[in-house]
Image: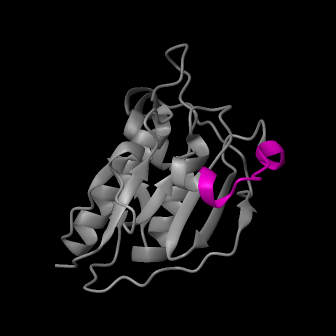
């Protein structure tokens, strides 16, 4: 079992998909490592705590005071990623309820545990005893496609599958969180 000094950090009021992102990170890291990462919000972070910051947290705002969202405005899948002082930051625009952070977590899981999602019965990840911190340079990540949609009954009825496949499920007249 991996033991870590890291927590998953969210804002006090995370966007809907940022909460999903925190849950997905914890879930898949637990499967891969046996370690259950604690999720804390801005009110409960200790001064010297190491963290993976999801969304516009107080720590993100302190460390990136001049952050300019305009490079990823109106994009659903794009996000900002950086490592600073051994902490990882994922932030997206607020245009799509935090989708960019969710997709950033899936990319982070791919880097950390070789996560691959094909279907709910076909998920791959490496089981590891050690995870190395990734030193990401500060940059905007723009996937090769912003969002896709596929119409099948399975997609209409399975919101988790749609999120993991980065599919837009608007079959109910609204997008689910």
Magenta stretch holds residue 27:
no
When asked about the image quadrant of residue 62, the answer is bottom right
Q: Residue at x 58, y 80 (%)?
A: 135
- Furthest residue in direction front, as rendered: 47
Which quarter of the rendered picture does the N terminus lie within?
Answer: bottom left
Residue 173 appears left or right of 126:
right
Residue at position x 57%, y 45% in the image: 56
Q: Is residue 40 above or below residue 76?
A: below
Residue 119 in view here: no
Tell me the residue at 38%/27% (across/down): 157
Q: What x and y, as percent, mark residue 114?
A: 43, 75
Which quadrant is the C terminus positioned in?
top left
Question: Is 63 colored magenta in this rendering?
Answer: yes
Residue lying at 73% horizontally and 51% vertically, measured from the top left:
145
Q: Position of residue 90 (x, y in %)?
A: 57, 56
Q: Is residue 111 above or below residue 77?
A: below
Highlighted magenta segment, given as a residue range: 61-72
């Amino acid at each position: 079992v991996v033991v870590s000094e890291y927590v998953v950090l969210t804002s006090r009021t995370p966007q809907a998909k940022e909460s999903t992102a925190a849950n997905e990170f914890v879930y898949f890291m637990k499967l891969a490592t046996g370690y259950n990462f604690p999720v804390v919000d801005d009110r409960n972070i200790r001064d010297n705590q190491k963290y993976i910051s999801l969304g516009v947290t107080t720590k993100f705002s302190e460390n990136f005071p001049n952050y300019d969202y305009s490079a990823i405005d109106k994009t659903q899948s794009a996000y900002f990623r950086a490592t600073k002082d051994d902490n990882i930051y994922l932030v997206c625009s607020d245009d799509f309820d935090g989708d960019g952070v969710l997709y950033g977590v899936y990319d982070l899981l791919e880097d950390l545990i070789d996560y691959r999602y094909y279907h709910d019965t076909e998920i791959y990840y490496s089981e590891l005893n050690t995870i190395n911190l990734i030193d990401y340079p500060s940059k905007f990540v723009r996937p090769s496609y912003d969002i896709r949609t596929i119409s099948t009954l399975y997609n209409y009825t399975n919101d988790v599958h749609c999120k993991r496949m980065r599919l837009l499920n608007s079959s109910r007249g609204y997008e689910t969180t």
